[in-house]
Image: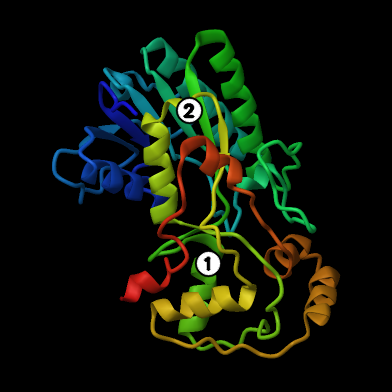
C-alpha cells in the first residue's frame, strides 16, 4: 500500500467525524489540510486550514484542492432534529448531492487521485429483516438525508466515469463516540436528567453501530489501499447491540445507569405507530444489521477497536 503523494483534504473538518479524521490522519504522519466554514482552532500541529464557506454546487474548492492527492469528504447536512427549511429535500439535495458532485468535478480537474465519499447505510434502507445489508443490495433510501446521499453516490459515479477520478464510497451506520450527536445526544441528555425511558425490555433487536475509531481506521485504509479503488464499502464495529444495551453504554459515558421501564416492545410499537413515528419505531425497536465481510476480505481489514467506544470515553 502506497502513501499519498500530496496532502489529504478533509471536508467538514470541524464536525463530529471530520475532526476525528483529521486527528487520526495527522497522528499517522500524513500532511492534512482541513476545509472549514469557520476556523475554530484546536488542530494538531502541522494541519493547514482553508476556508471554503457553505457547501453547495457553487462552492469554489480551488484553493483547498491545490496540490491535493486525496479528498475525504465528510461534510454534509445531517442531524437535523428541529427542521426549519421550507423544503428539506431541496436543502439536503443542495448540500449533500450537488455539493459532493461539484467537489468531485473540481477534484478531478485539480488532478486529485482519489475521493473518499462518506455516505450512509440509509442508502440501503431503514431496517433489516433477517438478512443484513450488503453492498450489492438495491438502494432503498428512507429519508431525505438518505436520498440525497444516494444521489451524491450516483452523481459521483458519473464524474468518475467521465474523468477517471477514483471514487471510494463508505456507508456507515450510526456513528458513536465520546461526544455523540443527533438522536444519541438526545438520549444522553435524557439519561443525564434521570428521565424514565420505556426500553427496558427491548433486548432482542440487533443494530450495528460504528465507532469513530473504527470508521477512521477504515478511512485511513481506503486512502492508501489499491483494492479500494472505485468500490463501495459497508462498515460497522462487527458487534450488533440491542436498544437496551445501547442506552446502558450511553449512560456509562457519564457513570449513570439509565432508568429503563419494562414496557413490552409490542405496546411501544403500537403507540409509536399511532403517533405516526414509524421512522423512530424502526430505529428503536427494529433491526439494522450490516454485512462487512466484503469490506474485510477486499481490504484485509478488521474492525479492531469498536464495541466499547462509549465506555472508552470514561476510562
Q: Position of residue 251 (x, y in %)?
A: 47, 80
Q: Secondary structure at mark 2?
A: helix
Earlier sequence position, callout 1 versus callout 2: 1
Q: Position of residue 172 (x, y in %)?
A: 55, 48
Q: Secondary structure at mark 1?
A: helix
Q: CA distance from mark 1 to mark 2?
A: 34 Å
The image shows a total of numbered marks equal to: 2
**Frontmost residue, 228 versus 123:** 228
Left or right: where does residue 190 sit relative to residue 49?
right
Q: Specify few, some or many for label 2: CA neighbours under 10 Å numbering under 14, 14-19, or 20 or more.
A: few
Return the residue at label 1: 184
Return the residue at label 2: 227
Q: Which residue is outermost to the left?
A: 45
Identify the residue at horizontal 71%, vertical 65% (top origin). 280
Identify the residue at horizontal 49%, vertical 24% (top origin). 229
**Frontmost residue, 38 versus 194:** 194
Question: What label sits on residue 3 in the rendered view?
Answer: none
Q: In the rendered image, which quarter contains the N terminus? A: top left
Identify the residue at horizontal 38%, vertical 66% (top origin). 178
Name which quarter of the figure residue 47 lies in.
Answer: top left
Residue 58 seen anywhere in this rendered image of the structure: no
Q: Position of residue 296 (x, y in %)?
A: 52, 44
Q: Are marks 1 and 2 in contact (CB under 8 Å)?
A: no
**Frontmost residue, 294 versus 34:** 294
Vertical order, 113 against 141 (above or below): above
Amino acid at each position: 500500500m502506497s502513501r499519498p503523494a500530496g496532502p489529504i483534504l478533509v471536508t467538514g473538518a470541524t464536525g463530529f467525524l471530520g475532526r476525528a479524521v483529521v486527528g487520526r490522519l495527522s497522528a499517522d504522519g500524513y500532511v492534512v489540510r482541513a476545509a472549514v466554514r469557520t476556523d475554530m482552532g484546536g488542530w494538531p500541529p502541522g494541519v493547514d486550514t482553508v476556508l471554503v464557506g457553505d457547501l453547495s454546487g457553487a462552492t469554489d474548492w480551488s484553493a483547498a484542492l491545490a496540490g491535493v492527492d486525496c479528498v475525504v469528504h465528510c461534510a454534509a447536512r445531517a442531524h437535523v432534529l428541529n427542521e426549519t427549511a421550507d423544503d428539506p429535500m431541496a436543502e439536503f439535495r443542495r448540500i449533500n448531492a450537488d455539493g459532493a458532485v461539484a467537489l468531485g468535478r473540481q477534484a478531478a480537474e485539480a488532478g486529485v487521485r482519489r475521493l473518499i465519499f462518506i455516505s450512509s447505510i440509509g442508502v440501503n434502507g431503514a431496517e433489516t429483516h433477517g438478512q443484513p445489508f450488503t453492498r450489492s443490495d438495491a438502494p432503498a433510501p428512507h429519508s431525505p438525508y438518505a436520498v440525497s446521499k444516494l444521489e451524491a453516490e450516483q452523481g459521483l459515479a458519473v464524474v468518475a466515469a467521465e474523468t477517471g477520478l477514483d471514487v471510494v464510497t463508505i456507508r456507515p451506520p450510526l456513528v458513536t463516540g465520546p461526544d455523540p450527536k443527533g438522536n444519541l445526544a438526545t438520549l444522553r441528555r435524557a439519561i443525564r436528567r434521570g428521565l424514565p425511558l420505556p426500553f427496558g425490555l427491548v433486548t432482542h433487536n440487533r443494530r450495528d453501530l460504528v465507532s469513530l475509531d473504527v470508521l477512521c481506521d477504515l478511512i485511513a485504509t481506503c486512502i492508501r489501499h489499491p483494492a479500494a479503488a472505485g468500490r463501495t464499502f459497508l462498515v460497522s464495529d462487527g458487534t450488533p447491540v440491542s436498544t437496551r444495551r445501547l442506552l446502558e453504554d450511553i449512560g456509562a459515558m457519564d457513570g449513570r445507569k439509565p432508568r429503563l421501564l419494562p414496557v413490552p416492545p409490542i405496546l411501544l410499537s403500537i403507540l409509536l405507530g399511532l403517533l405516526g413515528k414509524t421512522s423512530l419505531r424502526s430505529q428503536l425497536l427494529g433491526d439494522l444489521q450490516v454485512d462487512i465481510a466484503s469490506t474485510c476480505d477486499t481490504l484485509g481489514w478488521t474492525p479492531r477497536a469498536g464495541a466499547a467506544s462509549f465506555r472508552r470515553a470514561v476510562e
